[in-house]
Amino acid sequence: MPIREQVSLKAFNTFGIDARAQRLFELATLDELPQALAALRQAPPALVLGGGSNLLFTGDPAGTVLRVALRGLRVVQADADEALVEAAAGEAWDPFVAWTLAQGLSGLENLALIPGSVGASPIQNIGAYGVEMAERFESLQAVSLADGRPHRFDAADCGFAYRDSTFKRAGRGAWLVLSVRFRLSTRWQPRLDYGDIRAELRAAGVTAPTPVDVARAVSAIRRRRLPDPARLGNAGSFFKNPLVPAALAARLKESEPDLPLYPLAAADGAVKLSAAWLIDRCGWKGHRDGDAGVSDAHALVLVNHGSASGAQVLALAQRIQDSVQQRFGVRLEPEPVIV
Ligand SMILES: Cc1cc2nc3c(=O)[nH]c(=O)nc-3n(C[C@H](O)[C@H](O)[C@H](O)COP(=O)(O)OP(=O)(O)OC[C@H]3O[C@@H](n4cnc5c(N)ncnc54)[C@H](O)[C@@H]3O)c2cc1C
């Protein structure tokens, strides 16, 4: 029976928060979907759970947790230039990226080693090292959790933005993503200008990099920079990089000359600031409130040193938000979904 009661979610979220699901439905095949939807209707609300690497449990989730364990990878069609590939929502993201590279397909290599599932990748339009998932996305298949209606979403329906989408804005109980399709290339256009990718390749002695080399370089940088959730609970970046009006960015730069600014191409002239820099400047890196803390390697990563509760992590996050707002007049927005 795919449904269990009173299940600890500690192993199912990378923060390692010991929340408890009243009911947990493990969806392993599409044949079980009608049963899963019936279970959700019986005990709402629904929480769809992938790898649990982008959420913070601040208590026991009410209703039914639906853990997506659907598997399957396939090349849907291919020609000399590109291929359309499909992955079931429960496939783990990083092995999926490795599979695409093994098929000779490029486009996802900069997104190597991001934790979590394929089904969650459109929810916040995952991004790293100068690439966002939306650039490679073709469509996804989902069902409405309200009425079980199936729906295909094309890119234009998804409202992708920086760490955001229609799905994230709709709230966690609206849609269940079943599978995602990506359009990938056989003719590689490297994206090496972000961060330290070039330096990492040079250090590894790679002069003519392949997509696999880039995935390796990105993975090596990430392993050095980010705490491994298997050793220190975390959900990656806890805050989004704030987008602020150009006038505010210019004012801040006057008083903080080494503040990094990332002007965006958008017509409104918004400027992206580094949330990590703002937090670090307020002195939070390595800070600890009991078992809730800020990584000493990366100011943007909140960590659970052992037995922090989600409420303790959230309280620390709020103190950080307040201090950054007080000093810089910028309100940071959490990136993970707060449950
Ligand atoms: C060490 C570390 C590094 C990270 N680095 C990055 C990074 O570089 N870039 C980045 O963008 N993110 C990063 N993240 C965040 C996270 O890995 C991604 O957001 C990932 O896509 C979350 O996948 P998940 O399966 O764990 O989602 P979960 O945490 O399980 O869920 C996240 C949200 O998506 C919803 N959801 C999950 N699956 C489905 C589905 N099938 N259908 C509908 N809704 C669904 C959930 O309800 C929830 O609202 C990092 C996290 C960690 C721990």
Image: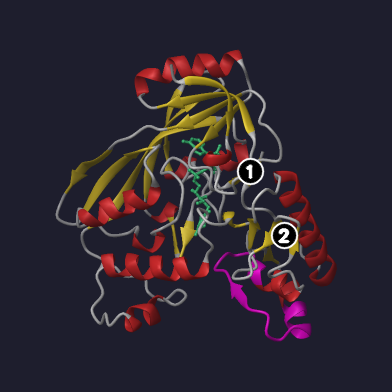
128 versus 79 height, above or below = below
- The answer to which of 14 and 142 lies nearer the viewer is 14
231 displayed left or right of 96? right
Q: Secondary structure at mark 2?
A: loop
Quadrant of the rendered structure where residue 270 is?
Answer: bottom right
Q: Residue furthest right?
A: 326
State the quadrant of the C terminus. Answer: top right
Q: Position of residue 93 (x, y in %)?
A: 39, 48
| Residue 17 found in image quarter | top right
Percent position of residue 326, x then y: 85, 67
Against 191, residue 167 (above or below) is above
Between discs 2 and 1, the one toward the N terminus: 1
Reply yes or no: does residue 261 show up in magenta.
yes
Q: Residues within 10 Å of mark 2 (few under 14, many from 20)?
A: many
Kindly state the secondary structure of the residue where label 1 is placed. loop
What amino acid type should be assigned to the residue bearing mark 1? Ile
Disc 2 designates what residue?
332
Locate residue 111 relative to residue 186 in the image: left or right.
right
Q: Residue at 57% of width from left, 49% of height from top?
A: 164
What separation in Å lies between label 2 and label 1 (alpha carbons)?
23 Å
Which residues fall within the magenta stretch?
250-276
Q: Is residue 1 above or below residue 339?
A: above
Give the farthest residue toward the left.
80
Label 1 residue near ligand 1, CB within 8 Å: no
- Asked if disc 2 and disc 1 are in contact, CB closer than 8 Å, the reply is no
Q: Amino acid at mark 2?
A: Leu
> How many labels sit on residues?
2
Q: Which residue is mark 1?
A: 17
Residue 144 numbered mark, or none: none
Q: Report x, y in % for residue 191.
A: 36, 70
Question: Looking at the image, can residue 269 be seen?
Answer: no
